[in-house]
Image: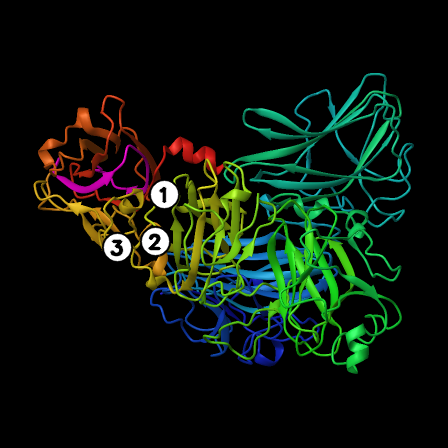
């Protein structure tokens, strides 16, 4: 088992961090001055709340945790009290996170706490400062801290309206219990100084106001021609009277001023930073005509300039803001260098309020002036910078008082006045000529960066349809039905997953008593305040509720497209849309004549409306856990191109193709299924148009279910006279699919769940980590009685002349042998299955991985193999006999595994070009 834990915090001694053996009496433990103080003895988390979007929840515990060899034996004070912890046993896996949040706080505060990290597989305990949606790590421990049960420490926090997050991260095994207890806050910094900045951990940057010094910055005096940056005194010539942050005469900032005749150079260097960082700074210049201010990233190989400001006749006595993003891989480390080069006598430059944050600058790009362009209260009788969409069935209106339907019905629908009581608002009139399903859409101007969208909405009436908000075609907020005769608050976090975008507000009609209104649209730079999950005392195995303003994952369900798209959405920035259809499609010679389930409707891509290579996309709601997707597809027509399933990771907005099929299929509906995994993602169907109008692609009966419902990647759906690329696809969850162990080889490939029997070799789980870590893969077991050079061969028969074969493989161990893909091509009439001896390395090898060309590491890796029939092979139906060959190395630490094999009917390079 694995778990993390919290318990009591003592405030009776400032020296508790130095004297952890000194305990406080119970009545001394909890100072109620701060809402964050908690010793958990009331069997609750006090004011600490579970955060939505993490992997699992914190729990409360008395005594030792359930796992042996890890976790504390009792709470911090030893008085048989409670502490909080995370239970890291199955189904938890490495990297899973549980978070608690408290706030908002203001002022300089010191957080005191006790923690326990005993066990051989301890993960991490992190504490974050959260401001405007940006997280900065201010305290972190990783690995065992094991010479005693409990340790005490503290961390300083600073700012206005910030939040504190305590995060536990699961380690690699069950012996990873971590505990925390006796949380309390005191005013002032932990070290007692008058702090005007957050002195964060080395790699997190933080903020420096220079009021108390240079913080983690140091003057670079390695060159005799370099002068030091100074702190302003408000007495020297060229200095400003006030700093930037507080605008006070007593505030200080970093300052450089030229003296003497020669040009002066000033340099200061940051502490070590790693990965992508965002730097916000404020500067002023005086007599800057020929001077420069630059920011560089210093690495071992030299310095790269990332930002530069030169005089060019400018004089900026006012503080000027700059935001600079330094992109780097997570493992790439560097130091930042601020350098001022001053050429004119008495020229000067000042720096203040340097802020370094992890990640991109998305959250800092927007300014109040930018975001205000989308604000609108409709009181002027206009839509401000919003416009009606051409996709609308009808238009939004602006009104005051009651709507027409509200007046005629005696108040059965719509508001009585705007949200303020004496202005105007925007609304849809749901009565005739509007019909069920009609939509009105407002579109914003182009936006950039992270913003918080706030608004008022009113949805009153028995026939109210839905109010939805989209960002660049993706649904991010939705309400349906009657919500009462009152104005309600709405909030949407427009995060950094999409840098530039437009927002669409869509209202849908159901019936005449369905007027919907909106008012007081407001956009604020940065993220929305974190909304925590409300909890009651001591949730043990509670299922958290979801905040109203955040997207709710769709329930496991089936969509048959009976006159609607259910929770699936057309993405409007592609080349067209999927359309509802019943009976046959408009074009002869392509498309189905009826739906797959007898319920009349399906959706289809009408190739007549598109050009060659154009694509359309249908995207799901957001998912937060692994699932099985099943669907029926129809691809009949001589110029059919491709149907894809794509997975979009909402954490980094990356997209990858999970499944695809190309070319004309038999003229009936086919069933397919595909596993998906991830913590926060969407799924898309992508149809790509072929050479002519004879390329309609149709989809029906999409079902979303538990992962266990997918027994194989593809259900062959019948005995077809022709095999196609998908016949080789296999995730080995329901067996070997169409692959066969050869009888003439030395031994067989084996199906496996979890770790292989031999230590220090083989994977710990399948590639996708689905089924709670219980997914399957195949491998070769190289322990006795196996000998060096023994071979296990897996065989597949596949027709066609050009394929891309993709698969995942795992080669970890000190005595790895080799993994090969071989192929023998025959004509259809010569259909005899080859034997193991027929495969020759020189003639038939298509791909190989061994100790010479592959690093041995405990990681799944992907391979791509082009299987193209050479021109020397005469035309006609060709039969490919494809073999996956695993060869034993010199000892038992040579297990090799394979998982998630997929084929597509084109070369790998062509597939990549189509995806880009």
- Mark 3 and 2 residues: CB-CB less than 8 Å, in contact? yes
Give the vertical position of 198 relative to 894 (above or below): below
Residue lying furthest top in this view? Answer: 262
Query: Quick one: label 2, few (<14), some, or many (20+) residues within 10 Å?
Result: some
Q: Earlier in the sequence, mark 1 or mark 3?
A: 1
Q: How many other residues sit within 10 Å of disc 3, few (<14), some (14-19) or many (≥20)?
A: few
Residue 234: where, in percent of width, then height?
Answer: 89, 40
Which image quadrant is residue 866 in? top left
Q: CA distance from mark 1 to mark 3?
A: 16 Å
> In the rendering, which numbered label is found on residue 718?
3
Residue pointed to by mark 2: 668
At x 84%, y 73%, the residue is 417
Query: Quick check: 136 left or right of 770?
Result: right
Asked if the residues shown at circle 2 and circle 1 are in contact, with their CB atoms under 8 angstroms apart, the answer is no
Residue 11: where, in percent of width, then height?
63, 70
- Describe residue 488's horizontal placement relative to residue 545 as left or right: right
Task: Magenta stretch: give its range.
Answer: 788-816
Residue 856 visible, this orientation: yes
Of 777 and 285, nearer the camera is 777
Residue 120 in view (yes/no): no
Residue 333 image position (x, y, % from top left):
54, 36
In the image, residue 611 sits, relative to residue 632, either above or below, namely above
Horizontal placement of 175 versus 395: left or right? Answer: left
Circle 1 sits on which residue? 664
In the figure, is residue 15 to the left or right of 897? right
Q: Residue at x 55, y 77 (%)?
A: 44
Choose the circle earlier in sequence order: 3 or 2: 2
In front: 445, or 71? Answer: 445
Which type of secondary structure does the marked residue at label 1 adopt? Answer: loop
The secondary element bearing badge 2 is classed as loop
Q: Is 826 included in the stretch rendered in magenta? A: no
Instruction: Relative to 472, say whether 691 is above or below.
Output: above
């Amino acid at each position: 088992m694995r778990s993390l834990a919290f318990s009591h915090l003592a405030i009776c001694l400032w020296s508790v961090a130095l004297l952890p053996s000194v305990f406080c009496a119970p009545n001394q433990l909890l100072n109620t001055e701060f809402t964050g103080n908690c010793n958990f003895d009331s069997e609750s988390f006090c004011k600490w709340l579970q955060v939505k979007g993490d992997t699992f929840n914190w729990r409360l515990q008395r005594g030792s945790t359930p796992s042996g060899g890890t976790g504390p034996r009792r709470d911090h004070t030893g008085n048989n009290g409670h502490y909080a912890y995370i239970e890291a046993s199955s189904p938890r896996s490495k990297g899973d996170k549980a978070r608690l949040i408290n706030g908002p706080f203001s002022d300089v505060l010191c957080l005191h706490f006790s923690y326990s990290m005993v066990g051989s597989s301890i993960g991490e305990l992190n504490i974050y400062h959260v401001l405007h949606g940006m997280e900065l790590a201010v305290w972190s421990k990783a690995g065992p801290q094991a010479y005693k049960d409990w340790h005490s420490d503290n961390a300083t926090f600073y700012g206005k309206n910030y939040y504190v997050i305590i995060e536990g991260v699961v380690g690699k095994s069950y012996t990873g219990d971590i505990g925390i207890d006796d949380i309390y806050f005191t005013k002032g910094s932990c070290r007692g100084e008058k702090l005007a900045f957050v002195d964060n951990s080395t790699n997190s940057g933080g903020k420096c106001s220079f009021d108390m010094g240079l913080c983690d910055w140091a003057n670079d005096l390695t060159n005799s021609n370099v002068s030091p940056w100074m702190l302003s005194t408000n007495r020297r010539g060229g200095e400003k009277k006030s700093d930037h942050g507080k605008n006070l005469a007593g505030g200080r900032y970093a300052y450089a001023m030229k003296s003497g005749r020669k040009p002066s150079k000033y340099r200061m260097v940051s502490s070590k930073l790693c990965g992508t960082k965002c730097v916000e700074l404020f500067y002023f210049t005086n007599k800057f005509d020929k001077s420069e201010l630059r920011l560089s990233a210093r690495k071992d190989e030299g310095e790269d300039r990332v930002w530069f400001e030169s005089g060019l006749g400018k004089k900026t006595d006012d503080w000027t803001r700059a935001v600079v993003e330094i992109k780097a891989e997570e493992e790439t480390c560097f130091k930042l260098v601020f350098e001022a080069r001053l050429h004119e006598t008495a020229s000067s430059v000042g720096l203040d309020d340097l802020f370094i944050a992890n990640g991109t600058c998305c959250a800092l790009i927007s300014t109040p002036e930018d975001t205000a362009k989308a604000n609108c209260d409709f009181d002027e009788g206009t839509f401000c910078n919003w416009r009606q969409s051409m996709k609308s069935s009808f238009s939004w209106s602006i009104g005051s008082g009651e709507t027409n339907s509200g007046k005629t019905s005696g108040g059965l629908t719509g508001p009585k006045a705007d949200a303020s009581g004496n202005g105007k608002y925007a609304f849809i009139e749901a009565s005739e000529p509007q019909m069920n399903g009609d939509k009105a859409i407002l579109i914003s101007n182009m936006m950039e960066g992270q913003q918080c969208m706030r608004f008022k909405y009113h949805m009153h009436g028995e026939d109210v349809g839905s109010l939805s908000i989209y960002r660049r075609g993706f649904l991010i907020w939705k309400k349906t039905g009657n919500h009462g005769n009152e104005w309600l608050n709405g909030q949407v976090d427009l995060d950094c997953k999409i840098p530039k975008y437009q927002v669409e507000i869509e209202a849908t009609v159901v019936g005449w008593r369905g007027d919907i209104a909106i008012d007081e649209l407001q956009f604020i730079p940065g993220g929305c305040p974190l909304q925590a999950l409300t909890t009651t005392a001591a949730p043990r195995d509670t299922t958290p509720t979801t905040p109203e303003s955040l997207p709710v994952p769709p329930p496991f369900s089936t969509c048959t497209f009976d006159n609607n798209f259910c929770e699936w959405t057309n993405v409007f920035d592609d080349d067209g849309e999927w359309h509802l259809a019943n009976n046959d499609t408009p074009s002869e010679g392509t498309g189905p004549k009826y739906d797959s389930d007898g319920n009349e409707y399906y959706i289809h891509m009408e190739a007549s409306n598109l050009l060659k290579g154009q694509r359309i996309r249908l995207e799901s709601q957001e998912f937060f856990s692994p699932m099985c997707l099943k669907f029926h597809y129809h691809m009949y027509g001589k110029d059919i191109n491709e149907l894809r399933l794509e997975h979009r990771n909402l954490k980094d907005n990356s997209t990858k193709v999970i499944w695809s099929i190309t070319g004309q299929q038999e003229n009936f509906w086919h069933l397919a299924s595909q596993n998906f995994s991830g913590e926060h993602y969407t799924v898309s169907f992508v149809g790509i148009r072929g050479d002519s109008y004879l390329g309609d692609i149709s989809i029906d009966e999409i079902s979303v279910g538990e992962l266990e419902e997918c027994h194989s990647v593809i259900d062959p759906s019948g005995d077809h006279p022709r095999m196609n690329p998908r016949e080789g696809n296999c995730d080995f969850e329901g067996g070997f699919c169409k692959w066969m162990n050869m009888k003439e080889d030395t031994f067989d490939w084996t199906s496996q769940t979890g770790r292989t029997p031999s230590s220090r070799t083989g994977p710990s789980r399948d590639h996708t980590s689905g089924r709670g870590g219980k997914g399957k893969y195949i491998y070769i077991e190289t322990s006795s009685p196996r000998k060096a050079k023994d071979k296990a061969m897996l065989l597949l028969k596949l027709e066609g002349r050009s394929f891309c074969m993709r698969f995942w493989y795992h080669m970890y161990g000190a005595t790895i042998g080799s993994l090969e893909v071989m192929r023998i091509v025959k004509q259809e009439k010569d259909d005899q299955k080859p034997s193991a001896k027929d495969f020759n390395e020189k003639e038939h090898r298509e791909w190989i991985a061994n100790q010479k060309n592959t690093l041995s590491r405990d990681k799944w890796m992907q391979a791509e193999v082009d299987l193209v029939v050479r021109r020397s092979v005469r035309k006609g139906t060709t039969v490919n006999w494809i073999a996956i060959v695993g060869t034993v190395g010199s000892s038992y630490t040579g297990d090799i595994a394979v998982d998630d094999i997929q084929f597509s009917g084109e070369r790998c390079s062509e597939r990549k070009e189509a995806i880009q």
